[in-house]
Image (cartoon, grey):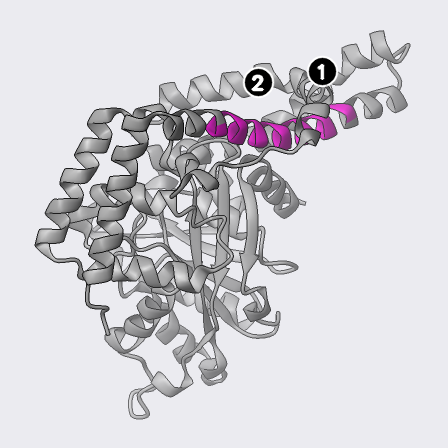
Amino acid sequence: MALQVVRSGASRFHRIEGTEGTEYITEQETPTILVANHQNGLMDPLVLTTIINQTQVHWLTRADIFYKKFARTILFAFNQMPIYRQRDGVDDARERNSRIFEICAERLRIGGRMGLFPEGNHRNMKTLRPLRRGISDMVNASLKLDPEMRNLVILPIGIDYEESPNFRRRLKYRIGPPLKIDALINAETNEITPGRLLEPISEALDKLLVNIQPERAYADLLPYVKAMRTTEREDWISCKAKIDRLKSLSDESIIDIQTALKTAVDAGVLQSARAEDVGMKPEDIRSISIWFWLISPVAILGGIPSFPLAKWLESQAQKRVKDPCFISTFKVSIGMFLFPVYWMLVALPIAHFALGGITLTTLLIGYLFNLLGSRISGWWYGILLDANGRRKAKNVWANKSLASSWTNYLQTVNDAIADAHPIR
């Protein structure tokens, strides 16, 4: 039941564009550790539960989030376990982590799946950071517990957010082939050294996610990558190949890109529209189906009852959440508990005034109206965002100064990519 609530909350908040590589999801009886990039706080493990069916996923989460009683109760309820870092100031952190890894190994042995973010912490950037040794400790604890755990596999997943903090922006998953650990085990020690495991995991993750490098030029390259609309692309391999060529840009090329971007920013391109909406060329302007306009009255009517609580959650997130990586976490984790209660309360006046009296049947009808109405309204709102983006993008391409400076920036990056030597 709780898993369905989480899936509903994640899919309502984000516009999930699809999952590539679902054929790689392992069978339930195969001991599996999920590994993924970590950009968006606790939303990352929440959204990944939407793609792993029929099996609970147990996640390791940084220990400091467990210090508050309410948060600890919620986290334990959703199979989260603390992992301690040096910065947590706990004297026996190594011993505590060792015990946690033993628990993880036991859960793997009895058929559970473990989830881990091997970067070790989150950051709201489209990059892949160096991996930490935690996953090798978990694997070695599993091998020590049960020799049969040699059949354990690691399932790499790339998470690609269009705009992670905000409601009804796109999200896409990419799943890669499982990595078998058997061939990596040292025959004498029956263990795997961290480096021998982390390197193939890093390579597998890098194939699945947007990894903008070099990091020193991240801000200069980000608008270009956003304009590629990676969450919407079906040709991921060619798209990824182009992104990877950015890694070998020369210093001279980076300076040229910085100059071109500054010209575009000074002209007002990115103040006028998002790079995702402008795209690479005028033909990239999104089209909006006539059905969007025809269904608008129904969507607005269905969303009106939920609007006050949605606005309250938005205001509370702005007031209470300082880290952008936890904005969507706050909205979804609070909303998935409050909205069902709120919809039931709103069902009371609907039952009384619209359906002729408060009975169990009229209450259920009123609740379903709010439940389905909010879902339709959320779907409609996502397209409304595209419609607004379309209007702004059209203004950019219609303005000669804006269009020229933006095209010059894109062409400068394209030229730099063409001159770059691919990394082998």
Residue reaching furthest left? 252
* Mark sitting on residue 309: 2
Quadrant in which the N terminus is drawn: top right
Residue occupying image coordinates x 26% and y 73%: 194
Q: Amino acid at mark 1?
A: Val
Q: Tell me which amino acid carries mark 2.
A: Leu
| Range drawn in magenta | 369-390
Residue at the image position 56 percent from the left and 32 percent from the top? 382
Which residue position is annotated with label 1? 346
Q: Is residue 376 left or right of residue 45?
A: right
User: Overall secondary structure of the magenta stretch?
Assistant: helix
Q: Is residue 53 above or below residue 150?
A: above
Horizontal side of 16 relative to 258 (left or right) equals right
- Pick the front one: 283 or 89: 283
Taking the magenta stretch, the answer to whether it contains residue 39 is: no
Whole-Å distance between the Cαs marked 2 and 1? 11 Å
Q: In the image, is residue 185 above or below residue 200? A: below
